[in-house]
Amino acid sequence: MRGRRIGGPMIKKVLIANRGEIALRVIRACREMGIATVAIYSDPDRTALHVRMADEAVRVGPPPPSQSYLNVEAILDAAKRTGADAVHPGYGFLSEKASFSQAVADAKLIFIGPPASAMRAMGDKLSSRSAMVAARVPVVPGLTTPVADAEAAIREAVKIGFPVALKAAGGGGGKGIRMVRDERELPAAFRTASGEAQSAFNDPRIYIERYLDHPRHIEVQIMGDAHGSVVAVGERECSIQRRHQKLVEETPSPILDPTNREAMQQCAVQAARAVGYTNAGTVEFLWSNGKFYFLEMNCRLQVEHPVTEMAYGCDLVREQLRVASGEKLSLRASMRPRGHAIEVRVNAEDPERNFIPSIGTIRNLRLPAGPNVRVDSGLYRGYEVTPYYDSLLAKIIAWGADRAQAIARLDRALCELHVGGVKTTAPLALRVLRDARFRAGDFDTHFLEGFTVAPDREREEVVAMLAAVHRHLGGSRSALAAAPQSDANNHGGPSRWAASSRGRR
Ligand code: MV4
């Protein structure tokens, strides 16, 4: 067998600058590779699974992220004190901050992610669009320079053609976008957009793109090493989202034929090469009327990476650790997916109450298992869902020989799930999986806006019967409000959220 190390620094101990399921995911890959791990934690996370599963753990601060998981000084100090030689940022928190990648490198530590230069090139939407145009990657028709004022915005928008999207150069991930239907709306929209961009990103620059109506969101996983190789590991269909929060992700995308899949992967590789990208990254595209357009690049491992791992039989975190230590990728450019993988995110939010965060203690917990089901979660009985961190509780991923089998298996897995103590998005995900349009692969980024469910006759009968009993006993109205609510194990029930969304349309 060829030597495992090809030169470059050996990683012996990794500090994981994150929490929750992604911290566990990284710890697991490290353990399999014989790499020691250091967890960091804030006060409420003192008893969290990532703290218990890592070899060592260091407190970095109080609950607010700004004082703990975003506290660069405390994190680098923890790395120094424990003798870690590398830092994995996970996703969210500091993961896409070029300044953090730089600070880690400056501290003579290995950043397990792309170089700061690639993050800067992709972080600015105008510089990334210019780089993509130069690399002959299709971008949404529009500008690669900012518009100076409302008058210039009108001139450019007329050339591009309405409707247009006003976007913040410093934005991304859904922040700072405004759709404009016609010329009359433009001056006011431009001023608002510019003001918002200034306050949100400390950068007032606005540019204009053609607005694509009802696009699909498809992204390509890429991995690059320091030896000049960049490979695409298929795509993920991520159109099922609400307010830029993804709910269901799958691979392959039901809409891509082999030709478009190949072309999109080629473009993603060109995009990564154009900015000298190494490590794991995701190139986002919008798909509209049979064509795809570069949107932005996410310079991190993503939440939904497990679907790629299941369909492609790879370990993306292992690859991240390999390339960060100077080794060559073990992935080949010719990889093809086997079967189909779908993930749903289970968030502590109440879909029946406009997705308000659901706070509380996990009193009861049953996580799905069984063949070809993967559960990535930091949950345990007694876990406290706090308002400090994002609401992701678990990711449930199912693999199937084909899409229908993956859906059936994920349906089965979601029926096994029981999270007692907080409301979750699991019942909504189950309704998506059972939706005829979803099953036909016929959906786009607006799918959840019009999402309604057929009322469940059986549940309606139970409710009607309870109401009759209630009237008969002459009880108070509030007793009725205590009737069982739908949860993951009562998935067929009509949703008040769905009813109100029906009303809004
Ligand atoms: C667009 C668009 C339509 N046309 N750009 C939202 C997230 C941000 N990264 C880009 N976004 C969009 N950009 C043009 N020219 C529609 C969206 C969009 C969207 C994109 C991906 C996934 C979900 C979305 C939901 C609403 C709008």
Image (cartoon, rainbow, N blue to C red):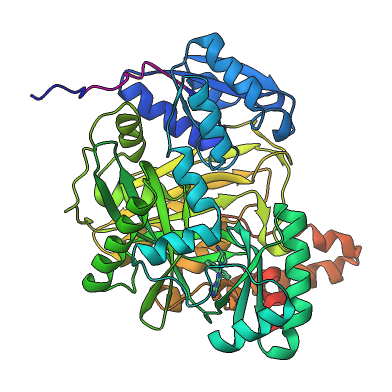
Between residue 482 and residue 357, name the one nearer to us: 357
The residues colored magenta run 7-14
Is the C terminus in the top left, top right, bottom left or bottom right quadrant? Answer: bottom right
Left or right: residue 237 versus residue 401 is right
Residue at 55% across / 46% down in the picture? 418
Q: Position of residue 353 (x, y in %)?
A: 74, 62
Is the N terminus in the top left, top right, bottom left or bottom right quadrant? Answer: top left
Write down the quadrant of residue 287 in the picture: bottom left
Between residue 149 and residue 258, name the one nearer to us: 149
Residue farthest along the left direction in this orientation? 1
Q: Position of residue 201 (x, y in %)?
A: 70, 53
Left or right: residue 469 versus residue 178 is right
Between residue 230 and residue 253, name the one nearer to us: 230
Residue at 61% across / 76% down in the picture? 165
Characterize the magenta stretch by its predominant secondary structure: loop
Write down the quadrant of residue 328 in the picture: top left
Above or below: residue 136 compared with residue 308: below
Residue 300 can be seen, yes or no:
no
Residue at 70% across / 27% down in the picture? 44
Above or below: residue 460 compared with residue 170: below
Q: Position of residue 139 (x, y in %)?
A: 43, 70
Between residue 313 and residue 316, name the one nearer to us: 316
Query: Within the magenta stretch, is there residue 178?
Result: no
Write down the quadrant of residue 148 in the picture: bottom right
Left or right: residue 378 versus residue 502 is left
